[in-house]
Amino acid sequence: MSKKRLFYLGFFVLLAIGFYIALTQLIPDYNKKGVAPISFIRPFAFTSQEGKTITEKDVAGKVYVAEYFFTTCKTICPTMNNYMKMVEEELRDQPDFLILSHTSDPDNDSVARMKRYADSIGANPKRWIFLTGRKDSLYNMARVSYTIDDPKNNLTRIEDQFLHTQFWALVDRNGDVRKIYDGIKESEVKELIKDAKKLLNEK
């Protein structure tokens, strides 16, 4: 092989190595499953069942799962929160894990009602936070940040909307939505638990 060919071969090998290093070291989060986040969490401010204001700063650096439900729901919500109770129990020893349950019906789900509901299912308020607030802010959060409902639904008047979704969003320590799960399918809930443990072990 001529010196010229050896030169070009060496050049392209070095170029390929440099490209790989750039992908894995210089571009943030490339190594995290090799998949870009679905979305990211925008600023928010809601009220917990304990009457405390919870913002994105309170969950910064945590891994958490977000869902939407309402306390008077008799269809999918009891199933979802039975599974969410399983999630809470499986990850109860993880101080950096949280559950955020947002109401879809803030006109009726007051702080006091959310507190009664949380207590009735034995939710630990340090790990499982129930949130209420402005309807438009809650719905926008579901559609734009968590991507568990179609943003096109925002085109109708907020008074005419009712969000009823069975999907959950798993958020990593950076505030990125990593994956969406079906909260009424046991197989997907078990998958979420495994994925949450992986994210908790990431540094």
Image: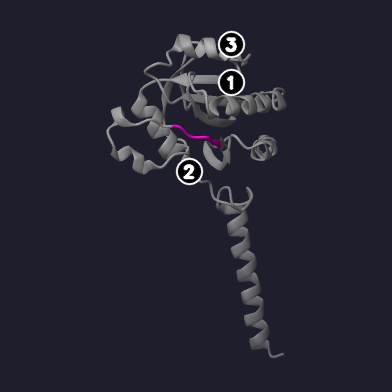
Q: Which mark is residue 146?
A: none
In the image, residue 173 sits, relative to residue 36, either above or below, namely above
Residue 59 visible here? no
Residue under numbered circle 1: 128
Q: Earlier in the sequence, mark 1 or mark 2?
A: 2
Residue under numbered circle 2: 39
Q: Residue at x 52, y 35 (%)?
A: 166
Q: Is residue 192 left or right of residue 72?
A: right
Q: Earlier in the sequence, mark 3 or mark 2?
A: 2
Front residue of 114/93: it is 114
Which element carries disc 2, helix, strand or loop?
Answer: strand
The scheme the figure's colours follow is one colour
Q: Quadrant of the C terminus?
A: top right
The residue most toward the left is 157
Front residue of 85/27: it is 85
Q: Is residue 20 magenta?
A: no
Front residue of 156/196: it is 156
The part of the chain drawn in magenta is 164-169
Q: Is residue 91 left or right of residue 143?
A: right
Determine the image quadrant of residue 159: top left
Looking at the image, is mark 1 or mark 2 nearer the viewer? 1
Determine the image quadrant of residue 3: bottom right
Q: Pointer 1: residues within 10 angstroms few (<14), some, or many (20+)?
A: many
Instruction: Tell me the kind of residue under disc 2.
Output: Ser
The residue most toward the bottom is 2
Instruction: Tell me the kind of residue under disc 1.
Output: Trp
Residue 82 point in image, percent of width and height: 63, 25
Residue under numbered circle 3: 119
Q: Is residue 165 magenta?
A: yes
- Pointer 3 and pointer 1: residues touching (CB < 8 Å)? no
Instruction: Tell me the kind of residue under disc 3.
Output: Asp
Which element carries disc 1, helix, strand or loop?
Answer: strand
